[in-house]
Image (spheres, rainbow, N blue to C red):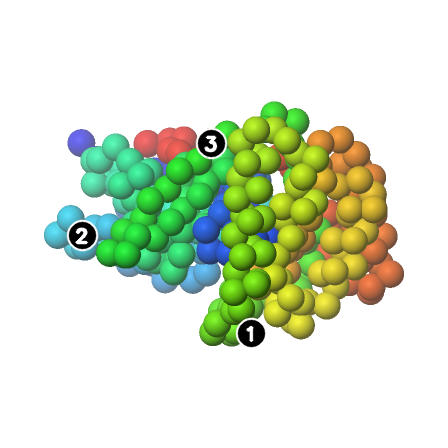
Amino acid sequence: MAPLRVRVRVPATSANLGPGFDSLGLALDIWGTLTVEAAPASVRADGMAWLALAAAERLFAQRGRPLPPLRVEYDGGVPVARGLGASAVARVGGLLAACALLGEAPDPHALLPLAAELEGHADNAAPALLGGFQIAVRRDDGSYLCAGFPPPSGLRAVLFVPQRELPTAEARRVLPRSVSRADAVYNIGRAALLAACLASGRLEHLDEATRDRLHQPYRERLFPALAPLVEASLEAGALGAYLSGAGPAVCALTSGREEAVAEALAKAARRLELEGETIITAPTSRGAHLVEV
C-alpha cells in the first residue's frame, strides 16, 4: 500500500568543480528535507515546493497516473540561487517522494534521465541522486551515462556563500556560443586531471585541476569578487578553489587548514564589501534517500 506521507533528504551539490562544465558534480554534507503528504485539495505552492511538485507530477504522468492533491514542506540549509544545487534538491526530492507515493522503490539511476531533463543538465542531479563525485555524460541519443566514486577521506569543502543571488539562467546568458580549440583542450586536460586526483587521492594537483577557461572568466563579469576570493583561499592553504555551479558561491577544497581558509575568505569578502557567510563542510558519499514513509 502506498504511503500518505513521505519525507526525503537530498544533499546540496557543487557542480563543474572548475573545468567540468555541465559534467562534474560533488555531493556535500548539507541537506534539504522535503515532506510530501496527501492533502484534501490542491495546495498553492511556490519556490522549492513548486519545483518538487512539478517533478512529482512528471513522474506520475510517465506512469499514466494523475498527481493527487499534495502538500509539500521544505526545510534545510541549502542556500537557493547560490550555485549549490537547490533546484536539484527540490526536483530530486520530488521524484523520490513520487516513487514512494506510487508504491515503487526509488532507483537513482532510473530517475537520472528525468531529473537531468528537468534540470537541463545532470551535473547537480547525478550527485544529488547518487552522492559522491559524479561524472555525467549525455549520449548522442539524449540519454545519460553516469559514473562516480566516493570522494577521498579527509577532503573538506570551505564555502563562501554571498548574500546576493545569481540565478542560473542569468549566469548562462553570459557564456559564449562557441569556444576556441585551445580553451577546449585546456579544460579537457584539467577535467581529466581532476577526476584522476579525486580517484587516486593525489590532491596536490587540485590547484591546477580546478582551473577553467570555459565559463568562469565570463561569469566573473557578473561576480567580480570571484578571482580575489579564489586567490585568498589558495594563499591560506586551500588545495584548489572554483566557482560552485553557476555561482556566486565559491568552493575551496581543503585537507586541513579549513578554519584558516574560512577566515581568509571572510576577510577577503569584508575587504570587497561583500556580504555573505562561510560554511565548512565535507563531501558526502550518500545521495538522496527516504527517511520516513
Q: CA distance from mark 1 to mark 2?
A: 35 Å
Q: Quadrant of the C terminus?
A: top left
* Residue that mark 3 sits on: 149
Residue 227 visible in this rendered orientation of the protein: yes
Q: What amino acid type is highlighted by mark number 1?
A: Val
Quadrant of the rendered image containing residue 162: bottom right
Residue in the foreground of this view, choosing between 293 and 20:
20
Q: What amino acid type is highlighted by mark number 3?
A: Phe
Q: What amino acid type is highlighted by mark number 2?
A: Gln
Q: Of the residues under marks 1 and 2, which one precedes in the sequence?
A: 2
Above or below, 248 relative to 32: below
Point 43% across, 62% down: residue = 46
Q: Position of residue 173 (x, y in %)?
A: 51, 74
Q: Viewer-nearest of labels 1 and 2?
A: 1
Residue in the foreground of this view, choosing between 183 and 283:
183
Q: Of the residues under marks 3 and 1, which one precedes in the sequence?
A: 3
What secondary structure is marked by label 1?
Answer: loop
Q: Position of residue 176 (x, y in %)?
A: 52, 73
Q: Viewer-nearest of labels 3 and 2?
A: 3
Point 70% across, 35% down: residue = 204
